[in-house]
Image (spheres, rainbow, N blue to C red):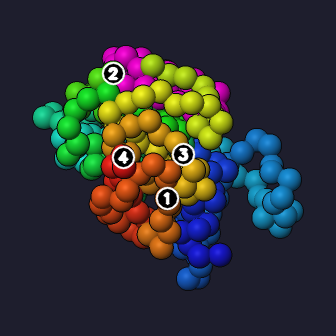
Amino acid sequence: MHAEEARASWLERFPAGFEEREVAGDLELAVYVDDVPADLREADIADVAPGWEQRWRSFHRPVVVGPLWVGPPWEEPPEGLTPVVIDPGRAFGTGSHATTRLCLAYLLELPRGSLLDIGCGSGVLAIAAAKLGFAPVGAVDVDPVSVETTTANARANGVGLDVLRLDALRHRLPESDVAVANIALEVADRIAARSATLVTSGYFADAKPSPPGFVHADRRTDDRWAADRWRRK
């Protein structure tokens, strides 16, 4: 398995974070858990030294995208930047992944209006949008943990979001001027957003979704990942 595919797979399985290092030219991934996944071989399991519970924090590093500083609550944002403080908890999205950075870069340029974050995870995109002046801002996810995490992060950042639990492939999505979906390719390819502008990401640059009702307007790439901007037909 290629390194990027391995990282993507582990991001989905262990959104709270994992460790990676190069060993003899190979990529080694390590995750610290109490309950060992059933598909791991016994040879892949090892005891770790005390204090591992805090080691994962070192892998959540702040990032700066334009005027935005996105980082965890144990880091101090610098003066002059707009802080988006994200405690990832058990949901995906810390700001450091290339797909999140690509989506944030698009949000910086789009006209302000209402916005919907589809598959909100930790809520990083919705919270950043609210701080950039989009309003009202909604966030939806099928995962109850993501809904809980987004709600908590929004409260910590002092922004108001309309956070709902729903399945974007089965339920009617709220209307918005802009929708952003940093999600799996198979979901982005079928999402029926009710928006004038749609931003999708979460997939490699050699793939391209075809969301129904939209025409392609722009594409950007970062570290083999891609984001696309679409406009309503």
**Pointer 3 with pointer 4, Cβ within 8 A:** no
Magenta segment range?
Answer: 137-161
Amino acid bearing label 4: Arg
Q: CA distance from mark 3 to mark 2?
A: 21 Å
Q: Nearer the viewer, mark 3 or mark 2?
A: 3
Q: Earlier in the sequence, mark 4 or mark 2?
A: 2
Q: Earlier in the sequence, mark 2 or mark 1?
A: 2
Q: Nearer the viewer, mark 3 or mark 4?
A: 4
Q: Which residue is mark 4?
A: 232
Residue 146 picture location, percent across and down:
58, 31
Q: Please tell me whether residue 154 belongs to the stretch shown in magenta.
A: yes
**Pointer 3 with pointer 2, Cβ within 8 A:** no
Left or right: 108 as drawn, with respect to 170 = left
Question: Residue 191, labelled with which disc?
Answer: 3
Residue 79 appears in the picture as rendered: yes
Q: Earlier in the sequence, mark 3 or mark 1?
A: 3
